[in-house]
Image (cartoon, grey):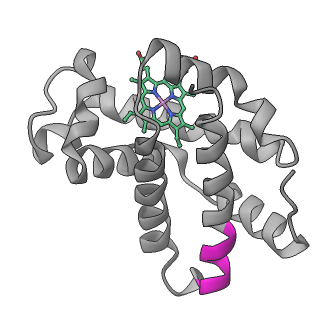
Amino acid sequence: MVEWTDFERATIQDIFAKMDYDTVGPAALCRCLIVYPWTRRYFGKVGNIYNAPAILSNPMVAAHGRVVLHGLDRALKNMDNIKDTYAELSRLHSEKLHVDPDNFRLLADCLTIVVAARMGAAFTGDVQAAFQKFLAVVVSSLGMQYH
Ligand code: HNI
């Protein structure tokens, strides 16, 4: 079980409370698909994602970026039991989607970069540590049902 300090809880809740899901989700997924092109292989159904301009203007990529970000709401609301909260989503990514779990970390890093760029000076080291701890627990939980 993960222990959270009051600062970590408050910081994580605050970041998500102020987050514009409609732009941050798409931006993080686009960045992941551009920076790590092998992650495109799971999105065969979304149409043209051949290069950066195509990815950035693809409405299905944007829609999925919003879905992923809203997926993090579940962890946010269940910070003391993220592992069980994500058991089903982990099974989906493992058994049905066959997503290599290494990619969870890559998307989480892209999300960190997007959030950092938006928060600017407010994204202090302590804030980064809290945010990345949260994402590390998410990534680990999403990888739990892989075997
Ligand atoms: Ni992911 C579907 C959440 C990382 C590829 N993904 C979902 C759904 C949620 C979700 C929620 C919708 C499930 C449903 O329909 O019941 N994904 C998350 C979260 C992360 C993540 C919280 C990590 C932070 N997914 C990734 C990564 C990839 C990925 C890294 C591939 C590189 N996800 C998919 C694909 C689908 C998906 C593919 C199915 C899309 C569809 O609509 O068919």
Q: Is residue 50 or residue 4 the one in the foreground?
A: 4
- The residue most toward the front is 147
In the image, taking residue 147 as reference, residue 137 lies left or right, namely right
**In the figure, 21 relative to 43: above or below?**
below
User: Which residue is drawn at the image coordinates 42% and 72% (left, top)?
Assistant: 117
In the image, taking residue 133 as reference, residue 107 lies left or right, namely left
Q: Is residue 54 magenta?
A: no
Q: How many marks can you see? A: 0
User: Which residue is drawn at the image coordinates 47% and 12% (left, top)?
Assistant: 96
The image quarter in which residue 8 lies? bottom right
User: Which residue is drawn at the image coordinates 63% and 45% (left, top)?
Assistant: 140
**In the figure, 140 relative to 70: above or below?**
below
User: Which residue is drawn at the image coordinates 49% and 53% (left, top)?
Assistant: 108
Q: Is residue 94 or residue 60 the one in the foreground?
A: 94
In the image, taking residue 84 as reference, residue 131 lies left or right, namely left
Residue 43: x percent and y percent? 28, 24
Magenta region: which residues?
A: 124-130
Q: Is residue 86 or residue 73 the one in the foreground?
A: 86
Residue 103: x percent and y percent? 40, 43
Residue 17: x percent and y percent? 70, 56
- Location of the C terminus by quadrant is top right
